[in-house]
Image (spheres, helix red, strand yellow):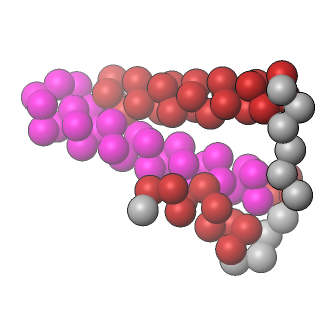
């Protein structure tokens, strides 16, 4: 169900750079919320956990994007 978040802008008709920026912002908010909740539940600092989750999520997306460029993979 979490995989729907990044595609919501396209489902609602946005395209291009506006859709990418909105998707990045929405995913960032969800990643930080997830990290903060984990921090609260584990007794750790919520902000630190939120930022850690954000970096891990964006890092994974960057690696995936880079591999797509490396192997010349495109959709559409």
Q: Is residue 19 above or below residue 63?
A: below
Q: Quadrant of residue 68?
A: top right
Task: Tell me the quarter of the image containing the C terminus.
Answer: bottom right
Rendered-image quadrant of the N terminus: bottom left
Q: Residue furthest bottom?
A: 12
Q: Position of residue 42 (x, y in %)?
A: 12, 31
User: For the image shown, how many numbered marks are present on the structure?
Assistant: 0
Q: Nearer the viewer, residue 20 or 47?
A: 20
- Would residue 44 be visible to someone looking at this image? yes
Quarter-of-image position of residue 11: bottom right
| Range shown magenta | 19-46
The residue positioned 61% from the left and 49% from the top of the image is: 25
Name the residue: 89% across, 32% down: 72
Q: Let me know if residue 51 appears in the view.
A: no
Q: Is residue 21 magenta?
A: yes
- In the picture, residue 36 is in which quadrant? top left
Q: Position of residue 53 (x, y in %)?
A: 41, 31
Q: Residue at x 66, y 24 (%)?
A: 63
The magenta stretch spans residue 38: yes
Image-based side of 3 in relation to 71, left or right: left
Percent position (x, y) of residue 38? Answer: 22, 37
Q: Check the image and report above or below for 68 versus 15.
A: above
Front in this rendered view, residue 52 or 7: 7
| Magenta part, dominant SS | helix
Q: Residue at x 74, y 25 (%)?
A: 67
Percent of width and height locating residue 12 = 69, 77
**On the picture, is 72 further left or further right than 54?**
right
Is 37 on the left-hand or right-hand side of 54? left
Residue 13 left/right relative to 29: right
């Amino acid at each position: 169900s979490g995989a729907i978040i990044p595609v919501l802008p396209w489902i609602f008709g946005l395209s291009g750079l506006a859709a990418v920026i909105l998707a990045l912002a929405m995913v960032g908010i969800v990643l930080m919320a997830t990290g903060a909740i984990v921090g609260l539940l584990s007794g750790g600092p919520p902000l630190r956990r939120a930022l850690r989750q954000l970096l891990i999520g964006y890092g994974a997306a960057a690696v995936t994007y880079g591999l797509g460029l490396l192997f010349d993979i495109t959709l559409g």
